[in-house]
Image (spheres, grey):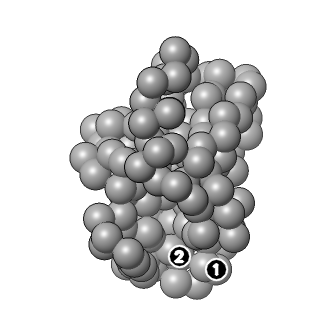
Amino acid sequence: MRTHTGGCHCGRVRFEVIAPAKLEVADCNCSICNKCGYLHLIVPADRFKLISGREALSTYSFNTHIAKHFFCSTCGVKSFYIPRSHPDGISVNARCIDSDTVESMSVKPFNGRNWEEGRAEYRDAPDT
């Protein structure tokens, strides 16, 4: 495990996340993730720390309103959010992590268009 840093495009929102050097992330095909190219690194909330930019965050939610999508109000980048699948955790956009601490990244597809079915498949996968 190591501490990775990252943030939004303009730099107002910065975070730290404790995760392996070799990241395993999910590529969700749901409507919002597909449109913004989000790659999910889901961690327990106690392994995530917002360093700066809380005042710059805007929140968006839809459908079940369980997920809380946080966007930088200046540049529009969603670098992290509270996911529906893990409401006590944080999903970090792996594309927003500063690359100098990431040794490798493996990407696994997630069927978010059919969320309940996709969640069951993902949960049952041997490497999750």
Q: Position of residue 16 (x, y in %)?
A: 47, 44
Q: Amino acid at mark 1?
A: Cys
Q: Residue at x 70, y 35 (%)?
A: 107
Asked which secondary structure carries label 2, the reply is: strand
Q: Residue at x 36, y 64 (%)?
A: 67
Q: Is residue 7 visible?
A: no
> Where 27 falls versus 13 (above or below)?
above
> Where 90 falls versus 17 (above or below)?
below
Asked which secondary structure carries label 1, the reply is: loop
Specify the label residue 75 is tagged with: 1
Badges 2 and 1: C-beta atoms under 8 Å apart? yes
**Residue at the bottom extreme of this rendering:** 74
Q: Residue at x 61, y 29 (%)?
A: 24
> Where 95 falls versus 119 (above or below)?
below
Q: Is residue 43 visible?
A: yes
Mark 1 surroundings within 10 Å by alpha-carbon count, few (fewer than 14), some (14 through 19), many (20 or more): some
Nearest the camera: 124 or 57?
124
Q: Residue at x 62, y 22 (%)?
A: 21
Q: Is residue 106 left or right of residue 115?
A: right
Quarter of the rendering containing residue 98: top right
Location of mark 2 (residue): 72
Nearest the camera: 107 or 111?
111
Q: Is residue 113 left or right of residue 66?
A: right
Mark 2 surroundings within 10 Å by alpha-carbon count, few (fewer than 14), some (14 through 19), many (20 or more): many
Q: Is residue 118 left or right of residue 85?
A: right
Mark 2 and mark 1: Cα distance apart in space: 6 Å
